[in-house]
Amino acid sequence: MNCLAFFVSDLHGSLYRYKKLFGLIEQEKPAAVFMAGDLLPSGLFAFSANNEIPSDFINDVLINGFLSLKKKLGTSYPEVFLILGNDDGKAEESLFIEAQ
């Protein structure tokens, strides 16, 4: 059993940071991934990201990214725990719950 766990926070919707995270999850196969706060693009980040943020970030990046990992890793797919932060809208919470 793999006891490795990842803890990340303050990704602020950065595509670079998410691609790096997904790559590390695929490579290291942790048992769990804890994601704490400020996961989504904030208003300030949107101004500095040169329009690189997908319009449906949750589905296009987060959900599709984790579904792709789930398909690749099969039984090695980690438990994923999310805690939304002050830059993450409460209205988006239901999308995460539905995607389980």
Image (cartoon, rainbow, N blue to C red):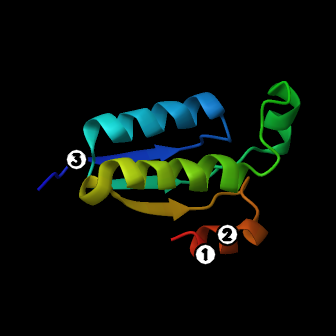
Kind of residue indicated by mark 3: Leu
Q: Quadrant of residue 84?
A: bottom right
Q: Nearer the viewer, residue 69 or 57?
A: 69
Q: Quadrant of the N terminus?
A: bottom left
Q: CA distance from mark 2 to mark 1?
A: 5 Å
Q: Nearer the viewer, residue 90 or 56?
A: 56
N-term mark: 2 or 3: 3
- Within-10-Å neighbours for mark 2: few <14, some 14–19, many 20+: few
**Residue 31 point in image, percent of width and height:** 26, 55
N-term mark: 3 or 1: 3
In screen coordinates, is 35 left or right of 40? left
View extreme (right): residue = 47
Asked whether the residues under the numbered discs 3 and 1 touch, taking CB atoms below 8 Å apart as contact, a structural biologist would say no
Asked whether the residues under the numbered discs 2 and 1 touch, taking CB atoms below 8 Å apart as contact, a structural biologist would say yes
Kind of residue indicated by mark 2: Leu
Q: Quadrant of residue 94?
A: bottom right
In the displayed structure, 15 sits above or below 80; it is above
- Please, what secondary structure does the residue beneath circle 3 have? loop
Q: Quadrant of residue 47?
A: top right
Q: Which residue is mark 1?
A: 98
Q: Which is closer to the viewer, label 2 or label 3? A: 2
**Residue 7 point in image, percent of width and height:** 40, 47
Residue depicted at 67% across the width and 69% down the height = 95
Q: CA distance from mark 2 to mark 3?
A: 27 Å
View extreme (front): residue = 71
View extreme (left): residue = 1
Residue depicted at 54% across the width and 47% down the height = 65
- Within-10-Å neighbours for mark 3: few <14, some 14–19, many 20+: few
Res 95 label: 2
Q: Which is closer to the viewer, label 3 or label 1? A: 1
